[in-house]
Image: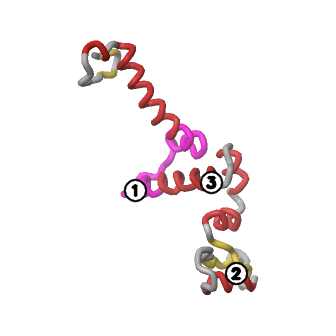
Amino acid sequence: MAYGDGACIDSLPTHLAGPADVGGLIRGRWGIENRLRWLREATWNEDRSQVRRVVAPQVTVTFRRRAVTLLKQCGHRKFARARRRFRNQPATVLAMVGFMFARRLCRRPCWNHEIVVLNRNIEGSESAKYHNRL
């Protein structure tokens, strides 16, 4: 079967391989792909990304997928709105991931945070003790 610019090879029996049947299967598959991809495209404008070096595109996509997962787990459904809300709040974002920021005095004003890993699973761990002192 060929139509326009696309082609399809299938192994379905003739009575199941009518144009409507095969078209429905193809549209269903692409619907899933497009739904997953559309979210990243709409939120991060992924098609205009200039990241092209070696593995950087895969790393970027992995971070974006993880960000979507975190936002879903925290109950956010409007991803573009959540992205705008959290883009200037690194402490909040890292707290969602499991890190925390501890204030410290520093000579340089741009380095006013230190990152401490917060291990929530182990009571009595050094990071949990440090967290309780803050």
Between 28 and 88, the residue placed more toward the observer is 28
Counting residues from the start of the chain, the first of labels 3 and 2 encountered is 3
Quarter of the C terminus within the rendering:
bottom right
The percent coordinates of residue 47 (x first, y second) are: 50, 41
Name the residue beneath numbered marker 3: 73
Mark 3 belongs to which amino acid?
Gln
Name the residue beneath numbered marker 1: 53
SS category of the residue bearing label 1: loop
Q: Is 44 one of the magenta-colored residues?
A: yes
Counting residues from the start of the chain, the first of labels 1 and 2 encountered is 1
In the image, is residue 123 above or below residue 71? below
* Cβ atoms under marks 3 and 2 closer than 8 Å: no
Quarter of the N terminus within the rendering:
top left
Name the residue beneath numbered marker 2: 131
Mark 2 belongs to which amino acid?
His
In the image, is residue 44 above or below residue 21? below
Mark 1 belongs to which amino acid?
Arg
The percent coordinates of residue 122 (x first, y second) are: 59, 79
Residue at 54% from the left image edge and 55% from the top image edge: 66
Dot 3: few (<14), some (14–19), or many (≥20) neighbours within 10 Å?
A: few
Counting residues from the start of the chain, the first of labels 3 and 1 encountered is 1
Question: Which numbered disc, 1 or 2, marks the residue closer to the eye?
Answer: 2
Tell me where the magenta segment starts and ends, as one range.
37-59
Residue at 39% from the left image edge and 14% from the top image edge: 20
Residue at 66% from the left image edge and 51% from the top image edge: 83
